[in-house]
Image (cartoon, coloured by chain):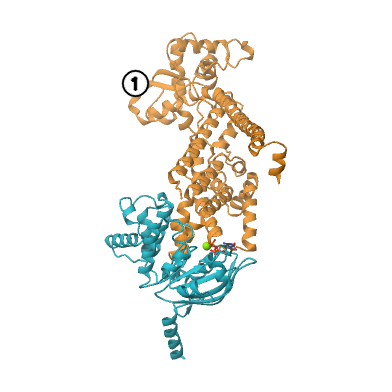
Amino acid sequence: MNDMTKVERDLNMSDAKIEARGVNLHYGTNHALKDVSIEIADRTVTSFIGPSGCGKSSFLRCLNRMNDTIDICRVTGQIMLDGQDINAASVDPVQLRAQIGMVFQKPNPFPKSIYDNVAYGPKIHGLAKSKADMDAIVEKALRRAAIWDEVKDRLHEPGTGLSGGQQQRLCIARAIATEPEVLLMDEPCSALDPIATAQVEELIDELRRDYAVVIVTHSMQQAARVSQKTAFFHLGHLVEFGDTGRLFTTPNDPRTESYLTGRIG
Amino acid sequence: MTDMTNRSAGKSNAEHISAGLARRHRKESILKGFGIAAISFAFLILGILLMTLVSTGYKAFTQTHLTIDVYVDPDVITRDALPRGAFDDLLENTLVEEFPDVDSSQDRRALLRIFSNGAQFTLRDRVVENPDLIGQTVSLNVPVADNFDQLNKDLISRDTPEEFRRLSDQEIAWFDALDEAGMISNPINFGLLTNADSRFPELAGLKGALVGSFWALLTCFLISFPVGIGAAIYLEEFAPKNKISDIIEVNINNLAAVPSVVFGLLALAVFIGWFGMPRSAPFVGGLTLALMTMPTIIIATRAALKSVPPSIREAAMGLGASRQQVVFQHVVPLAMPGILTGTIIGLAQALGETAPLLLIGMNAFITSAPSGPFDSATALPTQIFIWADSPERGFVSRTSAAILVLLAFLAFMNGIAIYLRQKFQRKW
Ligand SMILES: Nc1ncnc2c1ncn2[C@@H]1O[C@H](COP(=O)(O)OP(=O)(O)OP(=O)(O)O)[C@@H](O)[C@H]1O
Ligand SMILES: [Mg+2]
């Protein structure tokens, strides 16, 4: 029996980092996600697209159990990370969220210094052995998030004093400073100019070498540029999921086609 | 459609807007006017209150003193019987020297009554402390009795016919003579803050009440602050949201609305009746005040915690912070200004609270400051209550002065609240 599970786990490992089966989500009486099943591969960028309010953010938040914090929210179904049910009693959501980083739709830096924002995650998980270590972690994260040059002279000023786009990149830096295995990004470029967007996309591409990245985006071009897999959500359904190139050129579902051609959304 | 009708009526949209504009501006000025009127009214009342208090109270901030050289006569005071010596005779003799024509023993006693009752004890204490003074001359500076103080402050009018006056013509003449000799002064009345209560207004001070209030507030703070904040954090951040927590919430709000006298009765029955705690003790007063302050602190703390944006919690939680880390590293620090403001306002309320303290006996007449929280004491508001109830004229201005002292403390505490709020204020 042990062998069985091991084989199964190995299989899962090679196949999918995250596997969701029959996920339903209710906000009170609002049925926001309907029977969503998806496999998110490791070392791959997966993008979620779909009209506003279709449940992209809601599903993303299921993956690191952020919805636990919303009282009226109820999630059923199974979500596996490396073959382990993340909703199992034995799984500590704190541990889970250290493994699965998240960048939120609205930038939410702590009202602390830029440095403290980035250092917070490594600090609580004890990732830095010394001050120099921490400095290196902070600098690396800020560099990868393409914001180092803008903030290197004001690391001890409040993160809330940055512009919207800078805050967004600061939040990205904060999320990658803990080196999570999976990074969930909810519209990380919504407030960025084209140059910063290109830098963040570069970062996403780079992260793909080691991590699984999930990105929610309203930009079809961005999805096409950065992701290998794309999932299209509509009214709480996962309508279509497949290779990005294939989905954009020959969608199987008429709803996907309508959305891509701008007829629904 | 409206567009069309507007057009047909020969009016453009811009004309419609400007037609309504005058009315909208007028509404705004009316609202502003109401606001200004309300604030002016509040300030007027406050002004009247302060003016009445200051105009009656300011006279208690000085105290008429008599400066006189007393010869410590070795015939009257002997070393072996020092503390029981007849110091009043000594004072009497000194004054008789000033007025040699006084000879009847009745008049001599009347003369002595110029001194405050405490003068002989002041003299005694000095001589007991330094017995070498026997045989020497001591310069004594002591308060005069209340009636003479009133006379000096023009609160007893010389024009009143003698039979309605509390000082005889003779007494006034003596006082004037002393005044002429430069022996009467009217310095700042530090005794108001450094003396304990007394039956004699010229000796009565607020020290006992201040120390009593201090111990009571300290007890109140040490109990209500941690318990109140702990309860609020638990209810807001950790407790499951269900029927039970709803019931608790409603009851805390009800508790905040319970009249303070009820808490006094409760304290009387429970703390003093069941647990046998001492009556009149600031510790028991503090416990009672803590019962009243706790709901205020809980409500203020919960409001402060609630006002921390959820995005901050999510940010911390998304990084893998545990619930306790989210609460204590992010939410509570951000809520601190609100928590502290609520606490200080709660304590300020407690400082001015009278009824529950009356019920647990903190309106006793006690002539020494308490040496600890378990000694009998009064508190500022109950001291005001006692003085306001006293028949002596000198207590009228002292009551107002005590109220001013209480108000000064309240203003001071509110100042701290404002300062803390600004110091800890962060924007996000
Ligand atoms: N905290 C919440 N409480 C109640 N309902 C919610 C909550 N969050 C989302 N919803 C509802 O769930 C549905 C899906 O919302 P979600 O935020 O997942 O959409 P989305 O696809 O991310 O949209 P957008 O592209 O605009 O961000 C919406 O109908 C929304 O009203
Ligand atoms: Mg969203």
Q: Quadrant of the C terminus of chain A?
A: bottom right
Residue type at mark 1 is Gln
For disc 1, the chain is B
Quick one: which chain is orange?
Answer: B
x, y percent for residue A220? 48, 65
Residue A195, quarter of the rendered image: bottom left
Relative vertical location of residue A39 with respect to residue A136 in this rendering, above or below: below
Res B369 visible: no
Ligand number 1: quarter of image: bottom right
- Residue located 53% across and 67% down the image: A260
Q: Secondary structure at mark 1?
A: loop
Q: Colour of chain A?
A: cyan
x, y percent for residue A130? 28, 62
x, y percent for residue B126? 38, 28
- Residue located 65% across and 35% down the image: B15
Write down the residue under mark 1.
B136
Mark 1 surroundings: few (<14), some (14-19) or many (≥20) residues within 10 A: few
Left or right? Give the position of B41 relative to B301: right
